[in-house]
Amino acid sequence: MLKTIALLLLAAVALLLAYAATRPDTFRVERSRVIGAPPDRVFGLIHDLRQFNTWNPYERKDPALKGEYSATTTGPGARYAWRSDKVGTGSLEIVEAVAPHRVDMKLDFVAPFEAHNRAEFTLQPEGAQATRVTWALQGPVPYLAKIAHLFFNMDRMVGRDFEDGLAHLQAVAMAAPKPAP
């Protein structure tokens, strides 16, 4: 009887590992929100890493987070690195920016696990005073991550953070002083 149970458990683990191997090699998480501010204003809150961190949901998760900016904080080459017990250790770097339409970032984690992903912000005008902001994250999924993704829904976990961040981006953009006519 014990031998049968052990064989069934072994078969179940083997099936789970085989199924994990069939999962996609890449992931993409994406969320959008219409923000009641023009693209230029919203772009500035993403393109400048100091402004970015005023609404960044990961920055707010750990008040003890230790962050360090590079010499430049705006545009391609701007870099920010952090260490945190709650959100890990890593860095992000703006690799491309097309004002006021897109900002692409390289996102590298070293702890609690190593990951190398791309974050992309696209901004589309929605009328004269609104912008649709889409925040996307994409990257490779190594085999061990495929196994973890069977138990943890990455889209739901990261997506909630993106929704929170976009809501705070809206609050910051709406509070920003409006230019004089």
Image (spheres, rainbow, N blue to C red):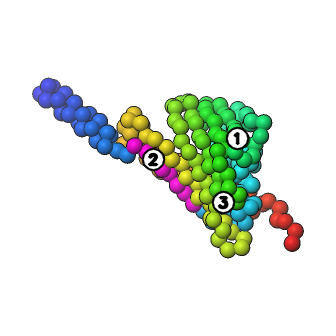
Quadrant housing residue 129: bottom right
- Nearer to the camera, 99 or 84: 99
Q: Position of residue 9 (x, y in %)?
A: 22, 32
Q: Position of residue 116 (x, y in %)?
A: 53, 37
The amino acid on which the numbered mark 2 sits, given as a three-letter code, is: Phe
Q: Is residue 176 above or below residue 119?
A: below
Residue designated by label 1: 77
The amino acid on which the numbered mark 3 sits, given as a three-letter code, is: His
Considering the numbered disc 2 on the image, is that residue within a helix, a strand or a loop?
A: strand
Q: At 71% across and 57% down in the image, what residue appears?
A: 99
Considering the numbered disc 1 on the image, is that residue within a helix, a strand or a loop?
A: loop
Q: Are marks 2 and 1 in contact (CB under 8 Å)?
A: no
Q: CA distance from mark 3 to mark 1?
A: 18 Å
Q: At 54% across and 48% down in the image, what residue appears?
A: 137
**Image quadrant containing the C terminus:** bottom right
Residue designated by label 2: 27
Q: Position of residue 40 (x, y in %)?
A: 74, 61
Report if residue 61 is visible in the image.
no
Sooner in the amino-acid sequence: mark 3 or mark 1: 1
Sooner in the amino-acid sequence: mark 2 or mark 1: 2
The amino acid on which the numbered mark 1 sits, given as a three-letter code, is: Gly
Quadrant housing residue 79: top right
Residues in magenta, as a range: 25-32
Residue designated by label 3: 101
Please, what is the dominant secondary structure of the magenta stretch?
strand
Sooner in the amino-acid sequence: mark 2 or mark 3: 2
Residue 29 magenta: yes
**Image quadrant containing the N terminus:** top left
